[in-house]
Image (cartoon, rainbow, N blue to C red):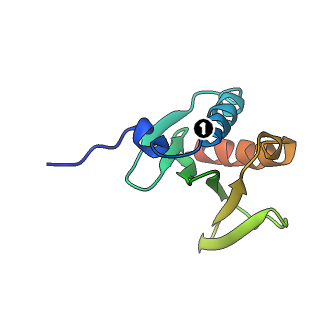
Amino acid sequence: MEETFTLESHFSGKEPVVRALYDHMLASLRKFGKVIEEPKKTSIHLVNVSAFAGVQTRGAYILLNIKADRKIESARIHKGEQISAKRFHHRVKISSLSEIDNELLGWLQEAYDLSGKK
C-alpha cells in the first residue's frame, strides 16, 4: 500500500514561522496562476504543468528548490546544480518573510513559466 503524505505532516513539530513563510510564498505564487501542491515524503512539490519548485520544511526555515533553464548567480543560492543540458536546480534558504522579495519571486516566475511550456 502506498504511503500518503499530507501538507500538515510537513509542518508538524516545526516553528510557526515555517508555516507563515510557506503560506506567504504560496499566496505570492498564486498571483502567477494556478499552483498545485503535491506533498511528497521529503518535500512539497509546487506544480504548474510540471513541478517548478520544491519546499523542504526545517525547524525554523524552509529550503526552496527552484527549477531554471540557466544558472542563477547570486549569493542567496546555497546550492546550484545542472541536472541536464538545459535544466538547473537552485536551493535557497528562507527564514524570514522579507526574503520572499522581488528577486526570489522573479526566479519563481521564470520557473513557473518554464514548467508551463510543452
Q: Is residue 56 left or right of residue 79?
A: left
User: Viewer-proximal residue, 80 or 49?
Assistant: 80
Residue at x 72%, y 31% (from the top left corner): 28
- Name the outermost residue toward the left: 1
Pinpoint residue 56: horizontal percent, then vertical percent: 54, 53
Residue at x 70%, y 58% (from the top left corner): 93
User: Viewer-proximal residue, 85 or 75?
Assistant: 75
Q: Quadrant of residue 8?
A: top left
Residue at x 34%, y 43% (from the top left corner): 5
* Dot 1: element: helix
Residue at x 80%, y 47% (from the top left corner): 99
Pinpoint residue 36: horizontal percent, then vertical percent: 50, 34
Q: Is residue 40 left or right of residue 82?
A: left
Mark 1 Cα within 10 Å, few/some/many (few <14, many 20+)? few
Q: Which residue is mark 1?
A: 16
Give the quarter of the figure containing the C terminus.
top right
User: Viewer-proximal residue, 76 or 115?
Assistant: 76
Pinpoint residue 71: horizontal percent, then vertical percent: 75, 67
Pinpoint residue 25: horizontal percent, then vertical percent: 68, 37
Q: Amino acid at mark 1?
A: Pro
